Image (cartoon, coloured by chain):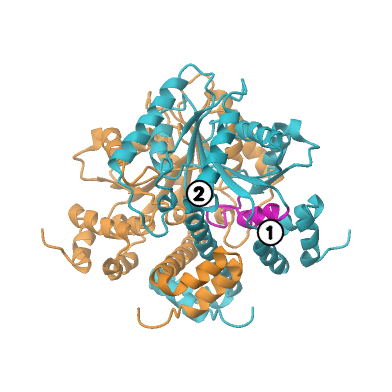
Chain colours: A orange, B cyan
Amino acid sequence: MAYIPSMDLVPGVLKGDTRAVARLLSRAENGNEEGRPALEEIFKRAGRAHVVGITGVPGSGKSTLVAKLTAAIRASGRKVAIIAVDPSSPYSGGSILGDRIRMGELVGDKGVYVRSMATRGALGGLARGTLEAVDIVDAAGYDMVLIETVGVGQDEVDVARASHTTVVVSAPGLGDDIQAIKAGVLEIADIHVVSKCDKPDADRTISDLKNMLVLSLGLQPHVPAPLDVGARKAARWQVPVVPTSSVNDKGIEELLKEIDRHGRSLKESGEIVERQAAIAERRLVKASEEMLRDKLEERRGELSVLLKELAARRVSPHYAARKLLTESGFGGDK
Amino acid sequence: MAYIPSMDLVPGVLKGDTRAVARLLSRAENGNEEGRPALEEIFKRAGRAHVVGITGVPGSGKSTLVAKLTAAIRASGRKVAIIAVDPSSPYSGGSILGDRIRMGELVGDKGVYVRSMATRGALGGLARGTLEAVDIVDAAGYDMVLIETVGVGQDEVDVARASHTTVVVSAPGLGDDIQAIKAGVLEIADIHVVSKCDKPDADRTISDLKNMLVLSLGLQPHVPAPLDVGARKAARWQVPVVPTSSVNDKGIEELLKEIDRHGRSLKESGEIVERQAAIAERRLVKASEEMLRDKLEERRGELSVLLKELAARRVSPHYAARKLLTESGFGGDK
């Protein structure tokens, strides 16, 4: 199969051709230079989809929920793309198999597109290419993009930063550690889901979560700060807690209603502008960091003396960083 | 209480004065400019401690294990510092209370120092100041530093990158999602622990893990790559699986033995040099990224037009990043 230049894939992507989409997605994931002009073009053509981040600790039943939610979105007549950020090894291949099994009933539906992005470890937070992947499916005409991540750390904060609406999934009976984590994610959730509500201790989880929300609203007066996810939250938006049960297909419609309501609320309150500004800033930081790392890779030879000095603790990281940044010459036409 | 300039805290830190340590830790966490020369000095004086990263999914019993391991290290006559990276909200305060309860029996022991670092969300991966915190307790004379993190994503990769030895804790009965994650962490573990081995299904977890290790060694011939955590792994080091039970105090001594054995193996194989080089490189990347974000903060006013263009998708993130990097002028005497 001949290699198609990335730029030549753009018209196909814009027409929603899934083969063109798949190819450009791979190039975004690989991060090779050749794909960049195409991804820049796609970036400019995207911006229409409602981007929904769905995050939750392992065992929360998030993946099944995403499959059910996808079916509900389809039933409402909209096209949906799922970008699954998966911390599994890129070698294991397990994630992709998992997707196929989970999304089984949706296979063959042209209104659904699923893509797993393996986290690589080498880059911060989200897998390289995740934000570009959202652009691609957005530009390809999917009305809703679900970014799914397993995370209790930086990944989920990054998902929240890249999304218009952030859904955090909890489940009953996951123990005290999980409870502790909830405190951290309260701030990023636009919507809370308590999944597996067929379980007997679900009511307690729901009331615990509601209490935590009340407590947190009481104890943490909202102080907007730059670069802070919290600052993006609509002052008027009351974070709902939606109980669901994938076994009984309960709560899925309600969840979609809340997601749509949040999307409308962003537009009506004008907060969408702030949120897009925050996403833009995040994109700028991400792109700068990637550029920096590429530069480090590129100059590895020249930098070896500096790195040795640093490893021997004769110079400080700050000194070395300034040297890297000043001497890297980010100018030029590259 | 008068403000003590950070530089004046350095002699106290080097003598192991815990009040000086606590104050400088706070300044590292806050990231204010005034503390930087002191942290640079401390960086140059550190490098003696054995840094052990301990990571595991929520519910793995990692925190209890850390408390037990701490007692074992103390019994071997060494001083130990614990840096707990906690994804809880900085507002909740829960983590610190949690530490106090867990570490209860060790309170009053001057050979143990515990510090929680709240992740802030605003920065990638580890909480700001975590690496500097390791320097501080290292320079203060603690023989072993345990970096404890809850994470299934970037955080734990970052911990692995900052450590000489990485311990990954699993537990029986945490479900399929957890199993999927293990594939991702196989690569970063120098030592695997299966905790809660008093539970009936522990044997299966241990054998699953061992099978995965064999499988992964079989299917993934080791290809060293730059910037890759995997590349740091000693070719000769066979990753052990240590069963523990905090309830019965079982396996803790064995775990400490394996940690010490790994430390010796790094030195004897000469791999410690590579690992220190990888840590140095990571420090350089981190410091550069922080500098970049500070610059973005500083130039927020000037950048507002660019950010608006980006939010409106009239320019690409790559274009904006190049503009930020080229025009920021990282030179000068700052």
Instruction: Tell me where residue A30 appears, x and y as whole percent.
Output: 30, 59
Instruction: Tell me where residue B20 appears, x and y as whole percent.
Output: 79, 55
Q: Is residue A126 above or below residue B79?
A: below
Q: Is residue B147 above or below residue B45?
A: above
Instruction: Tell me where residue B228 appears, x and y as whole percent.
Output: 41, 55
Q: Residue furthest front?
A: B268
Q: Please tell me which residue is depicted at 78% across the width and 38% down the height of the picture.
A: B109
Callout 1: chain: B
Estimate how packed mark 2 is, as few (under 14), some (14 to 19) or many (20 or more) residues with alpha carbons within 10 Å: few
Q: State yes or no: residue B129 in magenta.
A: yes
Q: Quadrant of residue A254?
A: top left
Q: Is residue A328 above or below residue B38?
A: below
Q: Please tell me which residue is depicted at 48% across the width and 51% down the height of the picture.
A: A160
Q: Quadrant of residue A2?
A: bottom left
Amino acid at the residue labelled 1:
Ala
Q: Give the number of the mark in front: 2 or 1.
A: 2
Measured in 3D between alpha carbons, the distance from the residue under mark 2 to the one under mark 1, in whole angstroms, is: 33 Å
Residue tagged 1: B28
Callout 2: chain: B
Q: State yes or no: residue B243 in magenta.
A: no
The answer to whether residue B85 of the structure is visible from this angle is no
Comparing A102 with B1, the one in front is B1
Comparing A195 with B267, the one in front is B267
Q: Residue furthest top?
A: B200
Give the magenta-colored segment's residue range.
Answer: B119-140
Estimate how packed mark 1 is, as few (under 14), some (14 to 19) or many (20 or more) residues with alpha carbons within 10 Å: many
